[in-house]
Amino acid sequence: MSPVIAPVISPVIAIRALSFSYAGVPTLTDIDLQVADGEFLGIVGPNAGGKSTLLKLILGLLQPQSGSIRVLQRSPVAASRLLGYVPQHPSFPRDFPISVEQVVLLGRMGRNRRGAALDLVWPRRTPDVDRAAVHDALAEVEAGDIAKRQIGSLSGGQLQRVLLARALVGEPRILILDEPTANIDQRMESEIFDLLKALNARMTILVVSHDIAFISNYVSRVACVNRTLVCHRTDAIDGTVIQELYGESMRMIAHAQ
Amino acid sequence: MEAFFTALTQHAFLQTAVATALLASIGCGVMGTYVVVKRIAFLAGGIAHSVLGGMGAAVYFGLDPLQGALPAAVAAALLIGWVRLHWRAQEDTLISALWAIGMAIGVLFIAKAPGYQADLMSYLFGNILLVPRESLWFMLALDVLLLMIVAVYHRQFLAVVFDEEFARLRGVPVEFFYLLLLVLVAVTVVLLIQVVGLILVLALLTLPAAIAGHYVHSLGRMMLIATLLGAVLGISGLALSYGPDLPAGPTIILLAGAVYVASASFRQILDRRRVRLAAARHGASGTTRENGS
């Protein structure tokens, strides 16, 4: 029942006394969070509670006003190439003229750090190792058959798999997903989470979700974010915790397993 | 038309005009594709129009207007790019203001230029028949520069044009490549001003790439087809305008506009037909499959 405060020895993510506000409105206040290597952490909370903001701070896309974040013992910006990110909404137009393969290939950028100056003298072709990685990533998310398709022709579930492949192809140490199943049906939601469960064997995973009941079957720990952050082990989640998080008016429905 | 091709063999100025159209089509196809897929036509418009400031200043100080156009275009591109990156809240207001301020500066300089009054109309609407032969070398140099940079950095450009946020996470210096892209758009604007003038540039920058986008689905192919289309439209427009002695720039633009409308309608008919055929097949198979995969 009580929040878990477990000191983690050399955590992959260490956040201390972090605060962030958008245009003067506090979004996150005094956040402390440590994520251990190999953990599968669920992040839940009401809309506009600061979940996505927390992810963007970890990714280095936003800078905190106070407090510190270390990711893999580095600053978030320096660590971003070692992270895989699946956004909630794709930040590109769906009618962009690009194939699935090319989208996933962009996830390999920044891996081999050959200087761009050298490219000027000797422009490089796509190395075979990158092509193989794209093939493997698409196979892993069971999207190998749509490699040649245009992204505009994909269904919501297919696009989600492609975005996951784009994040995986860079061989990330930490995979960060923002509501990966918001736009797809429930059967596919289970498929994606089964896949994440398998991936968790070789990488740390952070996943934002609004469905606390669903993800507690998969994750090892849940961080509840609503301007502040409280962690719970998944076996300790009951009505009181959910009410604290979402407020008194929440109505509980018991699910049979 | 035939009179045009006969004249082409005889008159050097027509040959120069055709070469100008061909050189311009390279920039038009390559950079036009980026402008269309990144949806920055408004930014490109701002760059094109504020170039008049530089051309006016060059005329005032007795230089070739083209020498003023290039630095003005690059400065406008950097300024507009900076506004877009750091002042997003008022982006459209500020870009419209830069657009008009650039033109106002140009008009003032031209009005006060000593001696021979430059022909304002030819800057605004272009005069491909008056392009001096030496300008061809300048245009060729710009084309080579543009193609080299795009050949080397096309992966970075694709990453930035497709998804800025993800590119940033992969360690791509997004701001640098965004500004470089706008500078190359500025170079292209200078190329195209020779053909259609700075007011009509926008259509030649976007229409060939947009038409190509109706049929092909990769940036490389769009660039190739848009370049060929740009060349064909430029030369056909020139030929059409020759007989009845029409201004070439507006003729080229009207031709491009007409082809775009025809192509968009054709594309829509194709799409509708495909939907209908798919629906018919669906009905014939007699199953109502879930939209699962």
Image (cartoon, coloured by chain):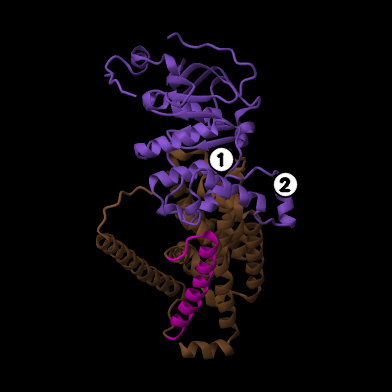
Chain colours: A purple, B brown
- Residue A17: assigned label: none
Residue located beneath label 2 in the image = A115
**How much space separates mark 1 and mark 2, taking CA atoms?**
24 Å
Q: Is residue B113 visible?
A: no
Check disc 1 and give the amino acid type. Leu
Q: Residues within 10 Å of mark 2 (few under 14, many from 20)?
A: few
- Mark 2 belongs to which subunit? A
Q: Residues within 10 Å of mark 1 (few under 14, many from 20)?
A: many
Q: Describe the element under mark 2 as helix, strand or loop.
A: loop
Q: Foreground mark, 1 or 2? A: 1
Q: Is residue B233 magenta?
A: yes
**Residue found 53% across the figure and 64% down from its top:** B221
Q: Give percent across and percent down for residue A209.
A: 41, 29
Q: Is residue A42 visible?
A: yes
**Residue found 35% across the figure and 17% down from its top:** A242
Q: Describe the element under mark 1 as helix, strand or loop.
A: helix
- In the rendered image, the vertical position of residue B111 relative to residue B92, given as above or below: below
- Mark 1 belongs to which subunit? A
Whether residue B168 sits left or right of residue B260 in the image: it is right
Range drawn in magenta:
B215-243
Choose the circle earlier in sequence order: 1 or 2: 2
Q: Is residue B241 magenta?
A: yes
Whether residue B227 sits left or right of residue B265 in the image: it is right
Magenta segment, prevailing SS (helix, strand or loop): helix
Q: Give percent across and percent down for residue A179.
A: 42, 33
Check disc 2 and give the amino acid type. Gly
Residue located beneath label 1 in the image = A168
Marks 1 and 2 in Cβ contact (< 8 Å): no
Q: Give percent across and percent down for residue A31.
A: 50, 17
